[in-house]
Image (cartoon, rainbow, N blue to C red):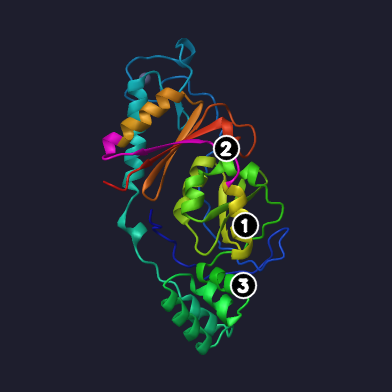
Amino acid sequence: MSLLGFRSPDSRRTVRSLPGSGEFAVPRPEPLRRVPPAPGSWPRLLVACANPGCGSGWLQLWRSRSAPVFEGGWSCSRECTSVLVRSAVRRELEGRTPSEAAHRHRVPLGLLMIEQGWITARQLRRALEAQRAAGSGRLGQWLTGIEGVSEQLVTRALSLQWSCPVMALDFHDPDALAPLIPRLFLDAFSALPLRVAGSRLLYLGFEDRLDPVLALAVERVAGLRVESGLVRASLFRPAQERMLGAAFPAVELIEAASEPASAAALVRSVERARPVESRLARVHDCLWLRMWLRPQTGPTPEAGQVQDVICWIGGF
Ligand SMILES: [Zn+2]
């Protein structure tokens, strides 16, 4: 799975501390995005079939099937579910533009640290040589490992490079947060949900690079505004290990050879589970379908309350 698409750095920076955090923080100002309501708070006013082309005239009130609900709309039949899901799959694939894969120019970490006066050119050269000789490891790791540069400084440099805050791990509750994002994504994209503030804002931590595509998908699926930041590697890794050991929602993995095949597989899942809500978002080369089997009461679901389907679409 490849990491694609990163936002261009934002030059407008302000400095403040995150609540409960002793860390240096550089918040990235962002335009307000529309975040869907948290699952469980959506209005239950839609009593007619959500498929605009449905000719049945069924109202939910008169139909024995009260589910499934897909993206807030009830569908009266399998055919109508299929129309809704196919159109959502089309929407997600249309979003897969080359611009997402475009190379964004970031100041190289080493140069940025020299510019700040945090390392010398000699230190950078030695770290780069060691990295090349070993053929592995991040530059930051080599700078800390052999040049004795503090990890805090490396993380601070990364946060300047990504124009994002450095986030703390205070009050981290892996069991409560694990059900927010499929385990596969946390593992593949080195992400870590840190905490939910005020029921509407999720702090999402990354080890050394942000993943705006994953962050946006989580916003749309979870109905939470997501603020991304970096976490110091020595804190990130043990916390991620703890989280990967927590209970995650059941997940079904599908590999689809074409757009119609992916839509058909997702329709089967929705019709089988008959969720009270379901949402679809693309995460790089995957379509992520989340289905709520019961209404969600708090800002995060419980592991048994939701089911995920991850459909690999990298092959077409
Ligand atoms: Zn219908």
**Residue shown at the point (56%, 63%) measured from the top left:** 28
How packed is label 2: few (under 14 Cα within 10 Å), some, or many (20 or more)?
many
Asked if the residue under mark 3 is in contact with the one under mark 1, i.e. CB atoms within 8 Å, the reply is no
- In the rendered image, which residue does mark 1 sit on? 238
The residue stretch that appears in magenta: 245-261
Magenta includes 38?
Answer: no
Q: CA distance from mark 2 to mark 1?
A: 30 Å
The amino acid at mark 1 is Pro
- In the rendered image, which residue does mark 3 sit on? 151
Q: Secondary structure at mark 3?
A: helix
Q: Is residue 7 left or right of residue 298?
A: left
Q: CA distance from mark 3 to mark 2?
A: 37 Å
Magenta includes 253?
Answer: yes
- Give percent across and percent down for residue 281: 42, 42
Q: Is residue 15 left or right of residue 266?
A: right
**Residue shown at the point (59%, 39%) measured from the top left:** 247
- Name the front one of labels 3 and 2: 3
**Residue shown at the point (36%, 28%) measured from the top left:** 267
How packed is label 1: few (under 14 Cα within 10 Å), some, or many (20 or more)?
few
The amino acid at mark 3 is Glu
Q: Which mark is residue 38?
A: 2
- Name the front one of labels 2 and 1: 1
Ligand 1 occupies quarter: top left
The amino acid at mark 2 is Ala
- Quarter of the figure with residue 7: bottom left
Q: Is residue 152 above or below residue 186?
A: below
Q: Which mark is residue 42?
A: none
